[in-house]
Amino acid sequence: MAAFIPMSELNIKSFVIPFYRSLLGFWILVLVFGGVFMELKQHILLGRFLFTHALPFAILPIGFLLYSGFHLRYQQLLLRRREYHIFHQTALLPFSSFGKDWTSIFLANHALLIAYLAFLSFFGVEKSAWVQLAILWLTIAISWFSTVKLMHRHLAKPLKEAVLLRPRWKKPLPRFSWFVLELRQNRPILLLLTKGLSLLLLNGFFLLFHSGSYDHRWLEFGILSVAFFQIPLLLEKNEFENSRLDWFKSLPSTFSQKLFVHLGSIILVLFPELLFLLWNGVRLSGEAFFISLPLMLISFVIALLGLIYNRPADSFFQFAFGSFMLFFLVILFGVPWIIPVVASSIFFAFQVKSPFQI
Amino acid sequence: MFNLNFPPISTKLSASQLAMNPLLSLTGFVKKYPSGFTLAIDRLELKAGIHLIQGENGSGKSTFLKALAGIHDSEGEISLDGISLRRDPLAFRMKIGYAEAEPVFPEFLNLDDLVQVVAKAKKSPTGQVDLLKETFGVAHFSQFPVGSYSSGMLKKTALVLAFLGNPSLVILDEPFTTIDAASQEVLADLISQKAKSGTSFLLTSHQSNPLDHIAIDSRLVMGNGSLHPHV
């Protein structure tokens, strides 16, 4: 008899890792705000404040419901993908078994949020806010039950077919547009979430910069953070090129053609952020921010893409952390922006030079 | 649109089987494709046996089979052994085995993972998994990730999954493509053997050689947005 892996491990691989991977940018943002900008003392104050003020407290159950709704939608869209049709069969399992599997998936994907709410609940107990506590934990229980029930209902019926989207463009679509169209077709939530949150992050950095307490390095640090925010999209790009575009490796593309396609697709993906930077850069007088900041963003992103090509295995994240620290130090010590831009571009050029790289 | 009542022409089926209600029946079936193409079948009844659907590339066979397997939605009524797909989708799907023409699975899983999901869901009898793995010769790669499989290995994986449980009807979309000649023979024998013990089959195939070894009860042709008897 074959040595089966436990069901929970299969669920982790299929429904937990992809979910966290798609929310990587969101959790980076949460860690930056909750772990770097806030200290433990502020979390304690926040907990006491929320349990003594009814209206702000509403953020907790409503926020949890929104996250849970997003999670449900994400999993339903995932199950519409052809390779996930195999899990359509799981609706045939006894409901107790199905419920057990989806309870473990729900708990794993909500673990960080539930842990933080448990931490905040301590202050609810301290303030004897029993009604709020009941509302909060009832919301979690309802979200869990709804997720299991709705997932079962979703899988019990025939699945909706994925609608294939193609722009109303009669001519052949240029190669550099393929990746962004792939994201729109197969990773719309990831694309929207990454763009929305990175614009929010950029806006936050610009707002603080306008307060006058920070110099240009603050904006450069913001650019670095936003570049690292794009990692989930860059991982998708790598996967797209090495799976569905694998055949194109056989084309005798010149180095300049490859560079054009890569830069074109990266600029398309970064279009909202670049537009934001150009607009805000022009508004800032005295410095050439409208040139330096967009170029820095593109170069940091292509450096990360080059790193993914260079280190496709698990070690990528260690190297990514190392490069974040390196760029952080470069910014901190006020090294002219052109140096990291040129260094990143050269590194990237070397990675795509190989004939085995698309 | 047309009416099609298909009597089985099998000499292997018993009289009691022939007298039974149709195994699969479709009424007012309509499937609209994303391209705008529509397949419409007013009425179709298939009795127990082995049935073959033929048709040109892009005639809509695969999407039709996915609708029959309960994977994608369609309009109209589909019932198997009197169980309606619309009213009782889980009981319906429990009695269906399905392998698609170009199977895809999550690349990070292996055959054993996939078998585990389906065998549990379809209440596969003890020993069936090992027997099927041995029959299709997949045991040696069952622990490799799917991402490393060749097209033939993927097809064999889909075939193993289609036979799991106790399906009344096994739908095999182009089952003979990409697998080697020996495996084609094994599959043809398995289909014949299972048909003798009461399992029905709905096949599509562009290859005639392996089909020569199977006693086909009825042949249908898909074309011009409908299904016709083969003449």
Image (cartoon, rainbow, N blue to C red):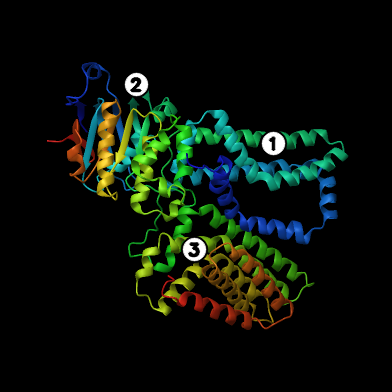
User: What is the chain letter for disc 1?
Assistant: A
Q: Residue B72, can we see it?
A: no
As helix, strand or loop, the secondary structure at mark 2 comes to: loop
**Residue A294: image x %, image y %?**
59, 74
**Residue A3: image x %, image y %?**
51, 42
* Camera-nearest label, 2 or 1: 2
The disc, 1 or 3, on the residue closer to the chain's N-terminal end is 1
| Quarter residue A48 falls in | top right
As helix, strand or loop, the secondary structure at mark 1 comes to: helix
User: What is the chain letter for disc 2?
Assistant: B
Marks 1 and 3, Cα distance to the nearest angstrom? 37 Å
| Quarter residue A97 falls in | top right
Task: Give whichever of B81, A277 is nearer the camera.
Answer: B81
Mark sitting on residue B82? 2
User: What is the chain letter for disc 3?
Assistant: A
**Residue B204: image x %, image y %?**
25, 40
Residue marked by disc 3 = A237
Marks 2 and 1, Cα distance to the nearest angstrom? 42 Å
As helix, strand or loop, the secondary structure at mark 3 comes to: helix
Residue drawn 70% across the image and 73% down it: A328
- Is B8 situated left or right of B132 in this image? left
Residue drawn 53% across the image and 65% down it: A312
Residue type at mark 3 is: Lys
- Is B163 situated left or right of A131 in this image? left
